[in-house]
Image (cartoon, helix red, strand yellow):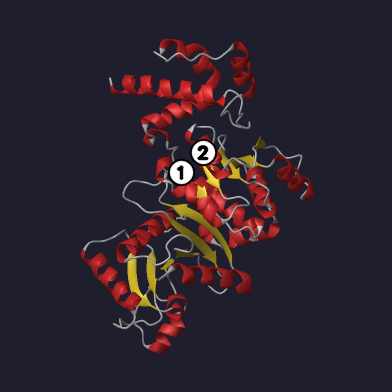
Amino acid sequence: MRKSLEELINSTPELKILVDKAIERTVGNPIRVAIPAADAENILKGVFMAQEDGFVDPILIGSYRKINETLERIGMADRKYDLHPISNDINSVQYAIEMIKAGSADMLMRGNTQTRDFLLPVLNKANHLIRPGRILTHIVMLKIPTYDKLLALSDVTLLVHPSIEMRKEVVRNMVDALHVFGVKNPNIALLSLIEKPAFHMKDTVEAQTIVIDHNDSPIAPCNLVGPITWDLIVSKEAARLKGYDNPACGDFHGVVVQNLMNGNLIVKVLQASCGAHNCGILIGANIPIAITGRSESPDESYLSLAACAAMNASPIRDSILPDRVIACALRRSATDILLNRVSACALPAVSASENDRERIAESGRGQPGTIRPRTAGMRFRIVRTALRKELKKHWKA
């Protein structure tokens, strides 16, 4: 761990609790983190820092050449890692998700990919990553030099113009995230331009509605305040000068923004111009997902991994549909299924030649760390379809 990061953690109680919890929960059993397009320099540095502290084992997915060049450039080619080279025509994020489903990895982290390319497979309903009845939100935990505690901000990546119900879900996810950082019954602010409802400013009316609904039926165990301006959120003195009487002023733990642009701009300005540190996590999924900017420092990657390790969410295998389980079984041992199980199925007149079987066995189709072969592909798909039908019948029975 770098000295600057160590000083930051020791000076911030919430981060200290977080890192201690991450190390404690993973003693002797580090979380296997799958990183698609793992040729991002600062992300790799942060990952190996986390590996040194014992709470992650990196799985690097992507171009063999790019990953090795990056590791050589940063002087970390000798580190311990699991490398899975794939060709350019394979979606590296989807590949990482399939590894997690198959039980070969525990956690997902964004690598050198565009935000859109990373999120599309995550949001794909066929992957079953989102918890039922919840929405996915990106929560950034900020350590601002002029603020004496960690401050959560959301949503800064996914929800362009969230509705009232979506903002309630953001509050719920934010409280869940803050619990991981050791914050109980947090003060949550609904950010607006002014601190009083005005009918010509829709977000202020929505904020008041959310607070009223929360008081009638609590969204989550928290103290919810809004609408409220940024200066009142971070400064007791500003509240005194404005005559705004609320004991939470200057003592807020989280801020829910009106829209995506406001949240993203706040984070980038605080980070680039004010020296703020942050870590980003996606809340609402069945697996831990760490997400940081590609231009951010290794410290941010380290802290995001620590947050996900502390969450220590369970794998999603139990929530996978039957056909997805079948696909996972095929990936785990395609050769075993082809040579041993297919004979028990009432297949059409399709049989792989001995040469085809050898090529399938050598290719390790679907096995992590290999590139999907194009040889014998049609035969394999026919066998897989027939096997699915038979196993589904057995499943229903």
Asked whether the residues under the numbered discs 1 and 2 touch, taking CB atoms below 8 Å apart as contact, a structural biologist would say: yes
* Residue positioned most to the left: 216
Quarter of the image for the C terminus: give it. Answer: top left
* 326 left or right, relative to 148: left
Point out residue 302 in the picture as x, y percentages from the top left corner. 61, 52
Point out residue 72 in the picture as x, y percentages from the top left corner. 78, 45
- Quarter of the image where one finds residue 11: bottom right
Note whether residue 26 is visible.
no
Give the mark nearest the N terminus, 1 or 2. 2
Mark 1: secondary structure: loop
Kind of residue sitting beneath label 1 = Ile
Which one is in front, 233 or 207? 207
* 223 left or right, relative to 299: left
Note whether residue 225 is visible.
yes
Kind of residue sitting beneath label 2 = Asp
Point out residue 144 in the picture as x, y percentages from the top left corner. 56, 70
Residue shown at the point (42%, 37%) measured from the top left: 316
User: Disc 2 marks which residue?
Assistant: 106
Residue shown at the point (32%, 62%) measured from the top left: 168
How many numbered markers are drawn? 2
- Quarter of the image where one finds residue 247: bottom left
The answer to whether 338 is drawn above or below residue 111 in the figure is above
Residue shown at the point (43%, 26%) measured from the top left: 326
Disc number placed over residue 115 in the picture, else none: none
User: Disc 1 marks which residue?
Assistant: 287
